[in-house]
Image (spheres, rainbow, N blue to C red):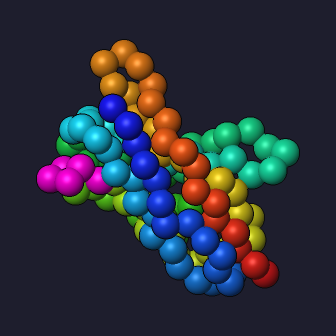
Amino acid sequence: VQLQASGGGLVQAGGSLRLSCVASRSISSMGWYRQAPGKQREVVAQITSAGTTTYADSVKGRFTISRDNAKPTVYLQMNSLKAEDTAVYYCRAPYYGMVVWGKGTQVTVSS
């Protein structure tokens, strides 16, 4: 399976962006991760095949992960963006015992 992430860009603090991750095949769960310069990659949000979601404390109440199984695509709606949200965002999915990563999409929030 291949994952293709898109939707990143430059936005002012307080603004919004929506990231998309399109999978080449049906997937079960998926997560969005991010990596800021000089920092380790961290999980941002995850969604299961049943639609159960979890979020990092730093994004709770601001970010929403959702999925469209028909496409299949997972979205990350990011509102009230802060400068500290600046990072490369990656989607990730387990697939038959493997872990598949999409290419990252850059999100830059200017303060």
Viewer-nearest residue: 54 or 76: 76
Q: Residue 45 in the image: state x and y as whole percent.
A: 47, 50
Task: Examine the rendered structure and indicate whether residue 83 appears above or below residue 49.
Answer: below
Residue at 40 percent across and 60 percent down: it is 20
Residue 72 within the magenta-colored segment of the rendering: yes
Question: Residue 96 lies in what quarter of the image?
Answer: top left
Residue 16 position, x and y percent, is 53, 79
Q: How many marks?
A: 0
27 sits left or right of 61 in the view: left
Image coords of residue 52 (percent x, y) = 29, 46
In this view, the residue in front, 53 or 110, is 110
The C terminus: image quadrant:
bottom right
Q: Which residue appears farthest toward the top when viewing the image?
A: 97
Does residue 18 sit above or below 27 in this rendering? below
Q: Quadrant of the N terminus?
A: top left
The range drawn in magenta is 69-73
Q: Residue furthest right?
A: 38
Q: Is residue 54 visible?
A: no
- Answer yes or no: is residue 78 visible: yes
Please provide percent x and percent y for residue 5. 46, 53
**Residue at x 20% of width, y 43% of height:** 50
Q: Residue farthest to the left?
A: 70
Q: Residue at x 74, y 39 (%)?
A: 40
Q: Choose top left, top right, bottom left or bottom right for residue 23.
A: top left
Q: Is residue 55 left or right of residue 74?
A: right
Q: Is residue 88 left or right of residue 62?
A: right
Magenta part, dominant SS: loop
* Residue 52 magenta: no
Q: Identify the residue at image location x=81%, y=50%.
A: 37
